[in-house]
Image: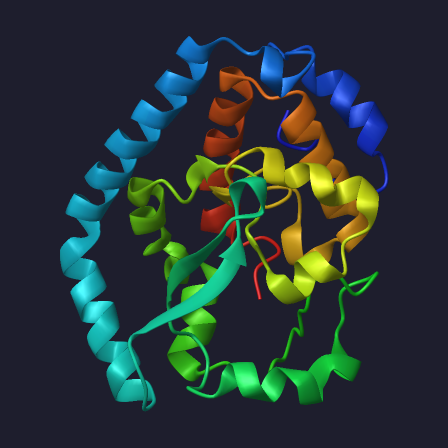
Amino acid sequence: MFNFFKPGRFHLRLKEISQFISLQDDVRAVKTKQFIVKRSLDLLLSMMILAVLILPLIVIMILIKIDSPGSVFFSQTRVGLRGKAFKLYKLRTMVANASSIQSSLENMNEIEDGVLFKIKLDPRITRIGKLLRRYSIDEIPQLLNVIKGDMSLVGPRPLTCRDISKLPTNQQIRDRVLPGITGLWQVSGRSETSSKFMGKCDRFYVTRWSFSLDLFILMKTVSVVILSKGAY
């Protein structure tokens, strides 16, 4: 089952996935009870994970500070539910002035279709940042976004205003649900796939959401993080 999400055979894989999970015809038709369970699980797991990781996080923050000058944390405006902007939190993995440098690197973008911006050997990434990004450790502070209600554990990737402005019309559906720390695209190759493939994943998740689909994605996330698939 974990081999279904590979670019190139998307429609075939969706039929296969349907054999393992219970899907809904439309996210708006899902019972309110399921959304309450989803939100409760978000809060419970987020607080538990933060409690367990607090000491390792302190060590990591010290290493970030030693490795390069600048804040330990990085915040950026992202677009969430119904187009509402919010501040997303991450551990800093790049040099302090990374955002101002990005415009000069646009011609080096390696993501097909150009909606997202990714470079495998991004010169802005710090030494400790490479390790944090490889195992998605830099994403841990987003558990605070989940607790605040800006995000869910599972959902479409929260995009920047720059990325949103480049999205085709048929991908605007993604703002009908909360963005997630992990999601269908994130466990399907993420940086190694195209923006178009991300759009397919987002549309499938939003229109066919179910609680069992969230559980499937959460379980898949564990193996993806351990194997550091598609991270850079």
Q: Quadrant of residue 147?
A: top left
- Residue at 59%, 46% in the rendered image: 186
- Residue at 47%, 88% in the rendered image: 97
Would residue 227 appear left or right of 73 to someone viewing this image? right
Q: Quadrant of residue 37?
A: top left
- Residue at 51%, 84% in the rendered image: 98
| Viewer can see residue 229 | yes
| Viewer can see residue 184 | no
Q: Is residue 95 above or below residue 61?
A: below
Q: Position of residue 214 (x, y in %)?
A: 50, 26
Nearer to me, 174 or 105? 174
Q: Is residue 35 above or below residue 69?
A: above
Nearer to me, 30 or 137? 30
Nearer to me, 225 or 104? 104
Q: Position of residue 76 (x, y in %)?
A: 46, 67
Q: Is residue 231 above or below residue 28?
A: below
Q: Position of residue 151 (x, y in %)?
A: 43, 42
- Specify the quadrant that holds the N terminus: top right
- Specify the quadrant that holds the C terminus: bottom right
Q: Is residue 89 above or below residue 178?
A: below
* Total tally of numbered discs in the picture: 0
Nearer to me, 82 or 152? 82
**What colouring does the structure picture have?**
rainbow
Q: Position of residue 228 (x, y in %)?
A: 52, 55
